[in-house]
Every structure is written in structure tokens, then in C-alpha cells.
């Protein structure tokens, strides 16, 4: 019951929780605070699927809410003082000439930005001035007016360990094969394209890249786009439209949400990685058809991601594929974070689970992360890609990919595939997997609450309290470690967290140094919330009858 | 820090409710007793409804499990995508080998490029290439993160500062993709319930931005200020009916400086007059006019001598005149800064590769050092416009100052497919004679107002007088031969 009360409050904050299944079992079995990892339908999995989301301790939850309460009260107080000109107001003002226009922003709309975000704004947008590799150099930045404006004294903080960039395979490099190849192309071709794919911007190198992507993923055909975000938002509208149903995971990235919205389809959201929720929506959709008219849906498209970048969870792909086949839906898999980072050959979540890429209708991914480049791709059957070639918004209206970027992808992908005749790619993939398991295990042993899958290189570590968001980021930077901290609204209000992205470029020494510092800062800020340092080693499939009833 | 406020709609409601509350209390004192009793009963009824067992409408159906299974078994979805026929006009792209510069190899034939938007020829600039190369050697290619999470590089800040300075505005913000710039900027300000007045010829990324904003969109006839004023007046009358609501409805005019679809310049001075008369904000898309119009290439504001502060937001891409990748918005900090937390394409996307930012900076350097380049371009545009006049069967669409003209059929065959085939034949004829042209491509079913089929003719500073004459001559020959 205790757990339920707590969860209830999480629901009411507007962010459904995916851990219902774990919850109910916990309550039923009477040991509410142990760590659980869920693997319903265990027989579908070829490997242990260990994913944990430890409950927020009650006291921490209460303190966190109190923290927000205090911040809100002070926010109102200071807004009041600004109103009466007691406190100096730093906010940019509307021009005098336009004072009588309808206000561009509602006055208290930016309450959160003004009174909460501004206090800890120095934790984000930190400018760097080197390769975002295993370590980077930061431009020193200071503020004399509590983060309203920044100054750059012109100094550089050298050799900060980088736990923030999505450089999973360490291909963010300024030397080596990739940089050399990209450099040669820059000199020969320049950086611009000045036209779209369908007009005068289709180079043979683009087509070569697409062939390579298709062979890497083991599919018939592929197409590349200049921006990862736009790959989703500009192609989903080509795949679904009016009369179609899109089932979207509640934690899907903004680009998927935007793409779904632009498509004009009906959108329904299922709980994060919750297969019962997904199956219920699928059944209801087919049985009841479209709202009001009850016409059957034209098609149903399921949108999921391989690794969720804020939770560190891995999609339950075997179950999703089973459901998709059972209900004849189509599957759109966004591998932004998982391509390169999962699977023995870096081919992503499909390979990780030992599945067949033909079972995924639309394979989408980005080149920004593991390949150290930019852009995204969509891969699948030839008829799908032919259709996109003629109907993708991106191919017709957006400037095509710059060639140095294309070259970086081709070279890094060939390296991952071993086509360059070396084992560099292979060893980096192994290295990443080892680093991930090691880093996660050590953090857990230290007593931090770590979210997500054991094999996910995205490692969220819970901070909970708003004051600790800024404090953790600053204390880590003082000790020369760059981390990402995230709070509301990117996470549920009480689940603020730090996020580490593990890279193959990290050496054991770097990780050890980082871990020591995290432990030190963790003691300082009292972040070692976990009550269970060791995960049970065996993966226990759940009994079918104990699924949570999905009341809506 | 991926902050986004989706709650503006509810906030707006709350602002309205404050008024309602005051009035409710007043009404409470004045209301007769039977009225209060009735309200009391209603409130009790609502409470009962809240606590009674809820059910979904759908679940009231009396289907048995077996029937459900049958329905699921029977349902056959449409294929994910319809089959594309092998001879679809846009399935087989023209293939460029080698750099897409002034001399370009299209489908194996070496041509002079009259198709890429490389207006200032900066794509081939050695200076830009070397700057990009040195940047590559310092930063690598990718940024491996969004701006918030260590994806901000010192060159990004420098480029933003330089763009703001070049445009003489307070602040600039860069995006990593040209298309995403205005498409993200519009929904950052305009929300559900707001009103946007848009020119019918607005480009596709504006249309997508409007769709994402879920605002109320009113289209006015292309460059027709009377039509716009008619809509604004209509709205004024509407506002008078409900002044309280009118106080919270934001309104915007979204126009392009130089329309990519029609090659026309917008009447900016008239728009500014209307802006102050009806208190509407102006968003200006300058992808085609930035680095083209005006004495210093500052675009349509400079062209007309309009104070840039009168425009609320200017957006442009860096993919045409600047010959790099990405886009930017500029204006007053009061407006622009909001996008750093609300521009979707800014917050949620990996940042621009630093070498591309460096290339853009170097391109800006060249533009600042040699403002004569804009004069050269404008003269060439005029020349080309003149040379193309009187091509039999084809009409030249666009103003003399525009570097990307459209050639449309004088007499349509009545079918879009056939028109496109004719124009494609002209393009192919020219390709065989070393003139690279392209058809203007659109998504026929997605465009709000589909422009007529056309051939694009792009003028750049690298084209010589003779090359332009040759191109015009070649097009004329093709037209005579193919259109008869």
C-alpha cells in the first residue's frame, strides 16, 4: 500500500509509470522495497533481460516535493519583489512600440524558467572547445548575476572526463581514418550541398552510404537524411495518415511525437515498455475500429525506441514483435541510441536479442551517436524505401547531407563492420559492453539508485531533489568530470537524475577515477539512496496471472 | 536540459478563469435563492458522477471473447506503403558525381550548374574549405549531443554572435537543419488558439511549422495586401465581439522575403504598416533572400530599408547563399531567447557539426569583406531574367532580382503529369548540352496550394555572361523543339 500511495502521486504528476507490473508483484509478495527486474514472457528471450527501477524511497519523495514547494514559494515571493521593483529584474522586455500587442508569452508561463531553471542554468549548455571524446576541454564560464548572463574570462578547463556525450563507440575523433577521410572530402567537395536530393543534391556518395547502411543492418534498402530529428518528424507523415492508428510509447522522443502528430493519424499512448498496455490498445483498436464510425483502422503503426535515453531501458523487442505479428501491426523502431551500441556486431537492438531485422518494418536510427557524425537513416524493404524516395518530405524539401559527414559515416561504419581490415570496430564494441557492465555494477555496489537495463550504455542515476541537480553537476565539474543532469519536465517531477553515457573510448582508469569522484560527491550530497546493492543474479519470469490490471 | 512548456494552453485558460472567478463571486451575492439551490444540486450530481463506477463507451459492446478473436483474425491492414511504379517521375534521382559546384557532373555529363542554390559561389571557396578543414582537425565531425548536453561548441557561440552582428539584431540562434528552423520557430510561439495569417505561396517548412503549432491558420492571396487587410479586419470585428478572449489570442503574419515557390519579393513596408495598425507580429522567412538582397546581403529588410527591429523574427537557412548547412533565427533577445528552451529542433536535436559552423563563419567573413559580391549577383540575376524573356512556350516567373527563377509552361496540356514530362524533356535536352537544370519538386498531395510545374533556373556569381547566354539559348532551342 505504501508503494501504491507513492506511485499514485507519480501518476498524478502526469507522467505514467511503467513499473506497474513490478509494483503489484512487490505489494503482493510483501517486500515492497526489494529490487525487481521484469521479464514477462521470459521464453521469448534468448538472453537474460535484467532491468531495474528501484522504488523511490518514501522519505526522499516527501523531501523532494517539499523542495519544490519551497522553491515555488520563493519563486512567488521573488516575482512579487520584481513586480514592486525591490529586486532587479533581468528578464528581457518587450519593445516599447509593441507594449499594446497581445503578449508573446503569458506572464507566469515562464515561472519555472525564471525561478527554478535560472538558479541552476550553469549545469547546461556548457560550451566545449575540443573533440567531444573520452575527455574534452570546456570553455570557462562564470556569471555575476545568478546565471542571467554568462561571461567568458577566456580560460579553458582542460581534460575534463566526458560522461555526457553520446560517443558510444568513440568515433568522435579528430585524428584517425574517419577524420582523414572526411578531411580529404572537405578539400575536394566543400561542405555545402545547396540543393535537395530530388533536385541537384543527390551524389553518388549518398547512394553508396545508403547501400552500406542496408548491408550493415541486413535489410534490402536504406535511405539517409541530414538530421536525426527530422528523420522521424519528416518521414512518419509519409507512412501514416488519416484513418491510421499510431501506438506510441509514453517516453518516446519528441521527434517521434512530432512526426506522429504531423501525420494526422490518431495517436494512442501505451505505458513505457509495458507489453500488457500495448496489447490492450492493439486489441481494443482492432475490435472497436475508429472512434464513432467504427470503421476498421487502415493500419496500425507501433512507434518504439531501442534504448530510451532518459531511462536507460531497452525495448522488449521480442515481445513487441510477437504482438505486432499477432495483431498485424507495423513496427517503427527508432535506434537512435542503440545502433552501434548494442549487439555483438553493433547492429543494434535487433541483433542484441538475436532477432531477424525483417520482422521490423521500419528501422530508423541516427548517425549522431555511435558514428560520431550527424543525420539519420531509415531502412527496410525495398518497397518502403522506394516509397520514401518519392514521398519523404526530407528528400524533396531539405538540403541533402554534407559530404564530410557522409564520409565520416561510411568510414566509421566500415570500421564497425570490419571492412577496413582491422578489428578496431569489433574491439570497441566489446569495450563498450564491458565498460557498461563494469560502470553499472560499481555504481550499484556503491549504493546509488541506477535505472535501466544492465546492458544499456545510458546510465541514469537518481538525484531526486531539485537542489541536488545543480549541486551534483557543479561538484562533478569542480573535480573535472562533465556529467549531464536532467530534471522536470524531461523527467517526472520527483525523478530528477544524472545521466552518464559510457563510451568505448573511456579507459578503465578514467572510469575508476570517475567512479571515485561520483562516490565522493555521492557521500557529500547523500545520493546513495539504494537499499539493495546487489541484483539477484537469476532472471525470474513473471507468472502470467500477476499482471497489473490496466484500469483507465 | 530539455525544457518544453506544453502547458501554455492551460495557462491561457487559467488567465481567463481569474476573471471568471471574480464575476462568480459577484454573481453569488446577486443570485436568487432557487438558483443557488439548483446549483447546489448540480454540484452534488457532479460529485456523484465523479465517484460512481466509470466505464468506457467502447467496453459496453456486448462482444464475447470469441467474437473479438474473430474480429482480430479478420482484420486486414493496408500495406505499410503503396507500391511505387518503376517509372515514377521522382523515383530515379539524377546522380551527381564530384562536387556540386559551378561545374558539375550530372548523370556522367559535365555541365554548368544552373540548379544548385550556391548563389555566391561560396561552396567552392578555398578559404571556406580550409577553414572547415582546420575546424575538422580540431573538433572532429559530429557533436555527439544536443546543445544542452555538451553539444555547444565555442564556434556555435561565435557563429551566433556573428550572425546577430551581420544582421544587426540583438541575438541569433542556430539550428542544425535548414528545414527545421522555421518549422520549429513557429510552434515555439504560436499555440493552439492563436491565429496565423500566411501567404498562400508559403514554402513547405512554414506549412509544417503551422501544422505543428496547431494554431488557427488563415491564408491570404499571394502578396495581396488588400486580402490580408480584409482578413485582419474580419478578425478585428471578431475581437470586438469577445474582447476578453481577444486579449490572449496571439497573432502572427508569416511571410517569406523572397518566395522560393514564386520568386517574388514580399511587400515588406506595407506589411509593417499593417503590423502596427492591427497589432500583429511578423515572422519573416529569408532563406532565399539572405545573402542575396540588399546592399550588404542582409535580405529583404535592407532591400526595402525597413528597420529590422520592426520584424519580430527573421529565419533563414545557411544552406543557400552561405553554402553550409543548418539555419538560424534572429531578432530581439526577448523573442529569440525563448527558442533555447522551446524550439523543438534546437533542444532535441544534435547540434550543428562544428566544421559546418566554422564554414559558415568564414562565408560570413567573405560576405562582409566584399559586399560588392551582392551587386554582382543582382546584376547577373537581372541579366538572366532578361535573357530568358521571350522564350517560346515558356513564361519566366519571378522578379528580375531573384536568383532562382521558375520557367512555367505558357499553355498547360491540362495534365500535371504531361506538363512535367514536357519540362523534363527540356531539362534533359539542356543536360545533353552542358546546362544543368532541374525541375522544382513538390509533394503534390501535401502542399496546401500546389505551385504549377516549373523548371528552376538558378543564377550564381560564378556564371559568366557567356554561360548565361548559352543557357538561355539552349532553353530557347529546347522549347522550340519540344513544345513546338
Image (cartoon, coloured by chain):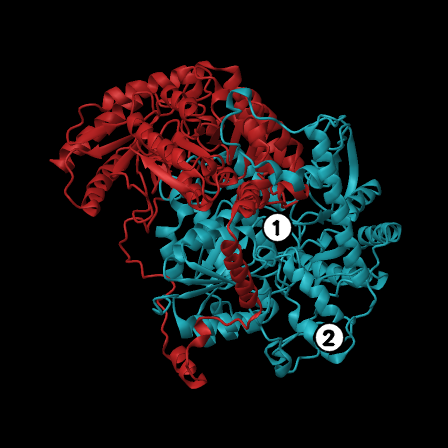
Mark 1 vs mark 2: in front: 2
Tell me the SS state at disc 2.
helix
With respect to residue B302, does A179 lie above or below? below
CA separation, marks 1 and 2? 37 Å
Q: Is residue B130 among what the camera can see?
A: no
Query: Which residue is the site of mark 1?
Result: A369
Q: Which chain carries label 1?
A: A
User: Quick one: B63 or B388, which is closer to the camera?
Assistant: B63
Q: Chain A is drawn in which colour?
A: cyan
State the red chain.
B
Q: Mark 2 lies on which chain?
A: A
Query: Which residue is the site of mark 2?
Result: A26
The residue depicted at 28 percent of the width and 58 percent of the height is: B85
Q: Quadrant of the rendered structure where residue B200 is?
A: top left
Which residue lies most toward the front here?
B33
Q: Quadrant of the rendered structure where residue B134 is?
A: top right
State the image coordinates of residue B244 (x, y, percent, origin top left). Answer: 47, 37
User: Quick one: A290 or B55, which is closer to the camera?
Assistant: B55
Amino acid at each position: 500500500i505504501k508503494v501504491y500511495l507513492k506511485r499514485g502521486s507519480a501518476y498524478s504528476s502526469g507522467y505514467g509509470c511503467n513499473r506497474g507490473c513490478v509494483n503489484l508483484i512487490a505489494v503482493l509478495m510483501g517486500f515492497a522495497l526489494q529490487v525487481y527486474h521484469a521479464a514477462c514472457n521470459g521464453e521469448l528471450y534468448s538472453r537474460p533481460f535484467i532491468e531495474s527501477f528501484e522504488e523511490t524511497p518514501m522519505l526522499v519523495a516527501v523531501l523532494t516535493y517539499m523542495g519544490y514547494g519551497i522553491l515555488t514559494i520563493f519563486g512567488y515571493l521573488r516575482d512579487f519583489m520584481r513586480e514592486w521593483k525591490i529586486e532587479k529584474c533581468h528578464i528581457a522586455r518587450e519593445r516599447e512600440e509593441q507594449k499594446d500587442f497581445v503578449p508573446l508569452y503569458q506572464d507566469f508561463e515562464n515561472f519555472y524558467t525564471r525561478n527554478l531553471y535560472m538558479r541552476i542554468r550553469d549545469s547546461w549548455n556548457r560550451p566545449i572547445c575540443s573533440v567531444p571524446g573520452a575527455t574534452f576541454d570546456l570553455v570557462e564560464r562564470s556569471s555575476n548575476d545568478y546565471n542571467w548572463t554568462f561571461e567568458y574570462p577566456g580560460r579553458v578547463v582542460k581534460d575534463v572526463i566526458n560522461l555526457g556525450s553520446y560517443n558510444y563507440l568513440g568515433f568522435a575523433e579528430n585524428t584517425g581514418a574517419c577524420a582523414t577521410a572526411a578531411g580529404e572530402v572537405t578539400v575536394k567537395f566543400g561542405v555545402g550541398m545547396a540543393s535537395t536530393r530530388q533536385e541537384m543534391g543527390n551524389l553518388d556518395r549518398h547512394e553508396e552510404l545508403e547501400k552500406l547502411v542496408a548491408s550493415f543492418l541486413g535489410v534490402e534498402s536504406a535511405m539517409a537524411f541530414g538530421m536525426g530529428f527530422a528523420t522521424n518528424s519528416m518521414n512518419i507523415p509519409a507512412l501514416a495518415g488519416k484513418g491510421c492508428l499510431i501506438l506510441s510509447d509514453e517516453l518516446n522522443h519528441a521527434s517521434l511525437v512530432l512526426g506522429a502528430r504531423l501525420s494526422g493519424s490518431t495517436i494512442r499512448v501505451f505505458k513505457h515498455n509495458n507489453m500488457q498496455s500495448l496489447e490492450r490498445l492493439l486489441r481494443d483498436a482492432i475490435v472497436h475500429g475508429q472512434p464513432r464510425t467504427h470503421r476498421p483502422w487502415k493500419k496500425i503503426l507501433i512507434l518504439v525506441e531501442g534504448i530510451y535515453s532518459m531511462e536507460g531501458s531497452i525495448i522488449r523487442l521480442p515481445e513487441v514483435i510477437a504482438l505486432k505479428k499477432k495483431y498485424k501491426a507495423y513496427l517503427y523502431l527508432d535506434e537512435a541510441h542503440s545502433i552501434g551500441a548494442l549487439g555483438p556486431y553493433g547492429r543494434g537492438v535487433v541483433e542484441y536479442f538475436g532477432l531477424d531485422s525483417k520482422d521490423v518494418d521500419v528501422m530508423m536510427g541516427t548517425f549522431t551517436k555511435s558514428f560520431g557524425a550527424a543525420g539519420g537513416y531509415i531502412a527496410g524493404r525495398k518497397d518502403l524505401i522506394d516509397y520514401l524516395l518519392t514521398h519523404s518530405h526530407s528528400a524533396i524539401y531539405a538540403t541533402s547531407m554534407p559530404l564530410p559527414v557522409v564520409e565520416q559515416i561510411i568510414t566509421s561504419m566500415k570500421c564497425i563492420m570490419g571492412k577496413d581490415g582491422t578489428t578496431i570496430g569489433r574491439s570497441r564494441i566489446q569495450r563498450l559492453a564491458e565498460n557498461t557492465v563494469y560502470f553499472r555494477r560499481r555504481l550499484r555496489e556503491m549504493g546509488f539508485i541506477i535505472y535501466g537495463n544492465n546492458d544499456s550504455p545510458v546510465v541514469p542515476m537518481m538525484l531526486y531533489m531539485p537542489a541536488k541537480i545543480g549541486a551534483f553537476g557543479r561538484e562533478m565539474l569542480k573535480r573535472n568530470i562533465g556529467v549531464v543532469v536532467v530534471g522536470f519536465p524531461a523527467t517526472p517531477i520527483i525523478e530528477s537524475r544524472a545521466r552518464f553515457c559510457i563510451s568505448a573510448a573511456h579507459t578503465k582508469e578514467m572510469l575508476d577515477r570517475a567512479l571515485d569522484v561520483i562516490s565522493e560527491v555521492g557521500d557529500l550530497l547523500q545520493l546513495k539512496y539504494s537499499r539493495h546493492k546487489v541484483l539477484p543474479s537469476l532472471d525470474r519470469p513473471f507468472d502470467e496471472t500477476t499482471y497489473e490490471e490496466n484500469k483507465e | 536540459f530539455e525544457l518544453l512548456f506544453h502547458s501554455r494552453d492551460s495557462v491561457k485558460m487559467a488567465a481567463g478563469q481569474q476573471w471568471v472567478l471574480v464575476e462568480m463571486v459577484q454573481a453569488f451575492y446577486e443570485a436568487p435563492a432557487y438558483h443557488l439551490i439548483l446549483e447546489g444540486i448540480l454540484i452534488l450530481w457532479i460529485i456523484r458522477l465523479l465517484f460512481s463506477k466509470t466505464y468506457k463507451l467502447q467496453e459496453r459492446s456486448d462482444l464475447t471473447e470469441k467474437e473479438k478473436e474473430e474480429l482480430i483474425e479478420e482484420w486486414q491492414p493496408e500495406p505499410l506503403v503503396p507500391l511505387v511504379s518503376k517509372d515514377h517521375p521522382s523515383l530515379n534521382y539524377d546522380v551527381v558525381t564530384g562536387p556540386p559546384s559551378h561545374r558539375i557532373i550530372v548523370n556522367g555529363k559535365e555541365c554548368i550548374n544552373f540548379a544548385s542554390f550556391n548563389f555566391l559561389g561560396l561552396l567552392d571557396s578555398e578559404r571556406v574549405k580550409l577553414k572547415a578543414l582546420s575546424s575538422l582537425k580540431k573538433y572532429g565531425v559530429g557533436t555527439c549531443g544536443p546543445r544542452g548536453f555538451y553539444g555547444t561548441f565555442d564556434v556555435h557561440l561565435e557563429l551566433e554572435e556573428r550572425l546577430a552582428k551581420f544582421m544587426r539584431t540583438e541575438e541569433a540562434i542556430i539550428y542544425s537543419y535548414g528545414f527545421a528552423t522555421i518549422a520549429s520557430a513557429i510552434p515555439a510561439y504560436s499555440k493552439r488558439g492563436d491565429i496565423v495569417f500566411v501567404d498562400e505561396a508559403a514554402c513547405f517548412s512554414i506549412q509544417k511549422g503551422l501544422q505543428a503549432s496547431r494554431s488557427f491558420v488563415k491564408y491570404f492571396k499571394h502578396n495581396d495586401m488588400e486580402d490580408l487587410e480584409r482578413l485582419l479586419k474580419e478578425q478585428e470585428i471578431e475581437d470586438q465581439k469577445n474582447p476578453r478572449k481577444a486579449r490572449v489570442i496571439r497573432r502572427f503574419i508569416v511571410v517569406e522575403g523572397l518566395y522560393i515557390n514564386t520568386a517574388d519579393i514580399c511587400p515588406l513596408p506595407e506589411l509593417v504598416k499593417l503590423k502596427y495598425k492591427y497589432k500583429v507580429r511578423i515572422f519573416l522567412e529569408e532563406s532565399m533572400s539572405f545573402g542575396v538582397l540588399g546592399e550588404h546581403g542582409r535580405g529583404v529588410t535592407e532591400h526595402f530599408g525597413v528597420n529590422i527591429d520592426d520584424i519580430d523574427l527573421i529565419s533563414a537557412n545557411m544552406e543557400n547563399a552561405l553554402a553550409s548547412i543548418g539555419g538560424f533565427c534572429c531578432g530581439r533577445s526577448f523573442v529569440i531567447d525563448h527558442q533555447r528552451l522551446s524550439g523543438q529542433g534546437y533542444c532535441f536535436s544534435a547540434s550543428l557539426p562544428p566544421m559546418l559552423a566554422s564554414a559558415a563563419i568564414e562565408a560570413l567573413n567573405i560576405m562582409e569583406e566584399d559586399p560588392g559580391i551582392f551587386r554582382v549577383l543582382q546584376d547577373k540575376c537581372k541579366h538572366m531574367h532578361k535573357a530568358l524573356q521571350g522564350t517560346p512556350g515558356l513564361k519566366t516567373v519571378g522578379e528580375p532580382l531573384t536568383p532562382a527563377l521558375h520557367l512555367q509552361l505558357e499553355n498547360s496540356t491540362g495534365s500535371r503529369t504531361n506538363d512535367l514530362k514536357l519540362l523534363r524533356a527540356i531539362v534533359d535536352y539542356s543536360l545533353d548540352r552542358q546546362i544543368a537544370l532541374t525541375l522544382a519538386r513538390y509533394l503534390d498531395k501535401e502542399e496546401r496550394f500546389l505551385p504549377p510545374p516549373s523548371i528552376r533556373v538558378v543564377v550564381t556569381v560564378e556564371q559568366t555572361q557567356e554561360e548565361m547566354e548559352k543557357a538561355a539559348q539552349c532553353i530557347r532551342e529546347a522549347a522550340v523543339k519540344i513544345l513546338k
